Image: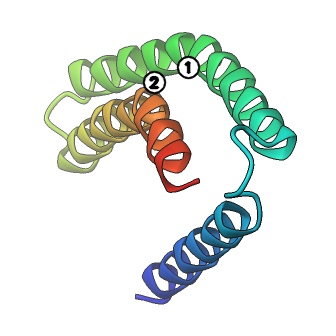
Amino acid sequence: MKNNKNLIKIVEILIIVFVFVGNVYGASATPSLVTKLTSAFTKIQSYLVKLAVPIAGVAIASGVLIRKFSFGDEEKLRMGKKMIVNAIVGYGIILSIDLIIKFMDALI
């Protein structure tokens, strides 16, 4: 519950910052700050995608192996399933960074 409140506050602050930046630099066609931010986010995205592919693969493989060698232990079955689901969700978030960047560009 507390994490959700913190996440909502962070998202609100980011929206306010990007709206402020959009209003301040809205008069020019493509301000240099926006171009630099877009370039930085694109570089971060490419780095994260390159890093996320092997990490997600290892996490999914680990989850499958834990489930395979749990020998009926319910705790290990749940842990393996949780690892697989978290790896897939995390990888999905990393892949959706492109949409988030385009959304931020639309705001600015």
- Quarter residue 19 falls in: bottom right
Answer whether labels 1 and 2 touch (C-beta < 8 Å). yes
Mark 1 and mark 2: span between their CA atoms? 6 Å
Q: How many marks?
A: 2
Image position of 46 with respect to 41: above or below: above
Q: Position of residue 24 (x, y in %)?
A: 76, 67
Could you say whether the residue bearing mark 1 is in a helix, strand or loop?
Answer: helix
Amino acid under disc 2: Ala
Residue density around tag 1, few if under 14, some if 14–19, many if 20 or more, within 10 Å? some
With respect to residue 42, does 74 lie above or below? Answer: below
Which residue is nearer to you in this view: 91 or 67? 91
At horizontal 54% and vertical 79% (from top left) the residue drawn is: 12
Q: Position of residue 53 (x, y in %)?
A: 51, 12
Instruction: Specify the quadrant of the image occupied by residue 85.
Output: top left
Label 2, secondary structure: give it.
helix
**Which scheme is used to colour this image of the protein?**
rainbow
Which residue is more in the foreground, 35 or 11?
35
Q: Position of residue 108 (x, y in %)?
A: 59, 53
Residue extending farthest to the left is: 72
Question: In the rendered view, would you say 45 is above or below 31?
Answer: above
Q: Mark on residue 22?
A: none
Residue tagged by mark 2?
Answer: 59
Q: Residue at x 28, y 19 (%)?
A: 64
In this picture, residue 60 sits left or right of residue 5 = left
User: Of 49 and 17, which appears nearest the observer?
Assistant: 17
Whether residue 88 is situated above or below residue 31 in the rendered picture: above
Residue 25 image position (x, y, % from top left): 75, 58
Task: Tell me the residue at 42%/20% (across/down).
Answer: 62
> What is the three-letter code of the residue carrying label 1?
Ile
Judging by the rendered image, the residue that carries numbered circle 1 is: 55
Q: For the N terminus, give its image quadrant.
A: bottom left
